[in-house]
Image (cartoon, rainbow, N blue to C red):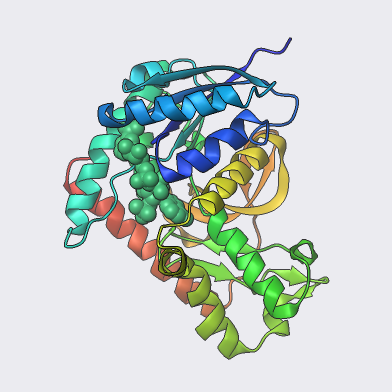
């Protein structure tokens, strides 16, 4: 039998964790023939709740689930890990300054990066979901000098999926008709969902919608969808975030011709090298590649630059705080 793949999930007792773990255990993260071993990392006060979730996982009798470990020690959680989903983070509380938020998250993602560096398997792949995801991924990466930098990624796939669904509804087409969607930049309100390269029925999407809808409805709806869900549901999105994490890792491992992911920049499209920024990407041979050669019009340029500027500011802030 195949050796199980070890998947570590942090913040495992949280909302997203609850929506994520059952799908991993059922085979949706890596494939229906890949056995998995789960490691649940939580803060000490949430370990008991994680144990409860583990009891439910047991009760599903998933054929592919070969074991569950629960711990509050990152060195244990990441020992031999092949995939790490970093979901647990410090949420922004009312009145919190950005510096405080970054500092609190530095205290989480720095040590986790080091624990990954010291303990994970050679093929470790890291996806950061916890916000501010791009900068948290950068912090973790900077504490893991022995892990190839490209193995640290942050999630913009939920933004990508939201963009697909908004455009499909507008044009009354199935989401499968839409190709080449791209989210650029930071997973934040400055992100840029790009319809100038997206295609519907083989034609550019931006040419099939009016400019006012694109600018004043589509972009803000995608960027502010998280707040709209909180407003409607009384709780933040969790199942859709978990779904996007599944999509990201599945495509990273199994390949795709085009999606969006925040990966370390190689300087493409004017994004400073090293920033973990969202790009149009393909995955080949288990590696993300930035799709090259796209022409960037002035409207897109301005928006990509604004989001990248925010990433530069976050990077400079965590540098100034000594977190990287
Ligand atoms: P959730 O599971 O709902 O969210 C976890 C993180 O994912 C948050 O940072 C959240 O950001 C982020 N996120 C990213 N994209 C989305 C999205 N589309 N919708 C919603 N959230 C998104 O949080 P809970 O509070 O339910 O659970 C967090 C758990 O993490 C707790 O159990 C806590 O104990 C644990 N934790 C564990 C740590 C560890 O393992 N060392 C460290 C810190 C916390 P945002 O805040 O912006 O919504």
Q: Is residue 89 left or right of residue 4?
A: left
**What residue appears at the point 35 percent right and 36 percent down from the top-left corner?**
140
Q: Nearer the viewer, residue 42 or 248?
A: 42
Q: Quadrant of ligand 1?
A: top left
Residue at the limit of the structure toward the top, as seen here: 1
274 relative to 140, above or below: below
119 relative to 183, above or below: above
**What residue appears at the point 66 percent right and 65 percent down from the top-left corner?**
164
Q: Position of residue 124 (x, y in %)?
A: 52, 26
10 relative to 136, above or below: above
The N terminus is located in which quarter? Answer: top right
Residue at the limit of the structure toward the right, as seen here: 201
The C terminus is located in which quarter? Answer: top left
Q: Is residue 245 left or right of residue 48?
A: right
Q: Does any portion of residue 138 appear in the rendered image?
A: no
Q: Total marks drawn? A: 0
**What residue appears at the point 70 percent right and 21 percent down from the top-left corner?**
63
Q: Position of residue 81 (x, y in %)?
A: 50, 21
Q: Does any portion of residue 25 appear in the rendered image?
A: yes
Q: Position of residue 134 (x, y in %)?
A: 40, 50
Q: Is residue 74 left or right of residue 156?
A: left
Q: Position of residue 67 (x, y in %)?
A: 55, 16
Q: Find residue 323 and report its image quarter.
A: top left
């Amino acid at each position: 039998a195949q050796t199980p793949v070890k998947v570590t999930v942090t913040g495992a007792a949280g909302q997203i964790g609850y929506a994520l773990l059952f799908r991993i255990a059922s085979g949706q993260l890596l494939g229906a023939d890949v056995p998995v071993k789960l490691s649940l990392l939580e803060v000490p006060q949430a370990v008991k709740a994680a144990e409860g979730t583990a009891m439910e996982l047991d009760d599903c009798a998933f054929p592919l689930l070969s074991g569950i470990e629960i711990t509050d020690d990152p060195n244990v959680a990441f020992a031999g890990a092949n995939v790490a989903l970093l979901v647990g983070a410090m949420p922004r509380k009312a009145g919190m300054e950005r510096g405080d938020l970054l500092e609190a998250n530095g205290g989480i993602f720095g040590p986790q990066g080091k624990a990954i560096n010291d303990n994970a398997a050679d093929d470790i792949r890291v996806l950061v979901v916890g916000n501010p995801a791009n900068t948290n991924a950068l912090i973790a990466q900077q504490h893991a000098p022995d892990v190839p930098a490209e193995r640290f990624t942050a999630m913009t796939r939920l933004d990508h999926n939201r963009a697909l669904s908004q455009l499909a509804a507008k044009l009354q087409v199935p989401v499968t008709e839409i190709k080449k969607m791209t989210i650029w930049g930071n997973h934040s309100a400055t992100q840029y969902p790009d319809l100038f390269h997206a295609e519907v029925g083989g034609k550019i999407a931006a040419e099939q919608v009016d400019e006012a809808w694109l600018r004043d409805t589509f972009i803000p709806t995608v960027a502010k969808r998280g707040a709209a869900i909180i407003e409607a549901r009384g709780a933040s999105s969790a199942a859709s975030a978990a779904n996007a994490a599944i999509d990201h890792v599945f495509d990273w491992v199994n390949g795709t011709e085009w999606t969006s992911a925040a990966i370390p920049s190689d300087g493409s499209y004017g994004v400073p090298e090293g920033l973990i920024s969202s790009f149009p990407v393909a995955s080949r041979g288990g590696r993300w590649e930035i799709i090259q050669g796209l022409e960037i019009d002035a409207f897109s340029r301005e928006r990509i630059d604004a989001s990248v500027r925010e990433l530069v500011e976050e990077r400079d802030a965590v540098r100034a705080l000594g977190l990287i």
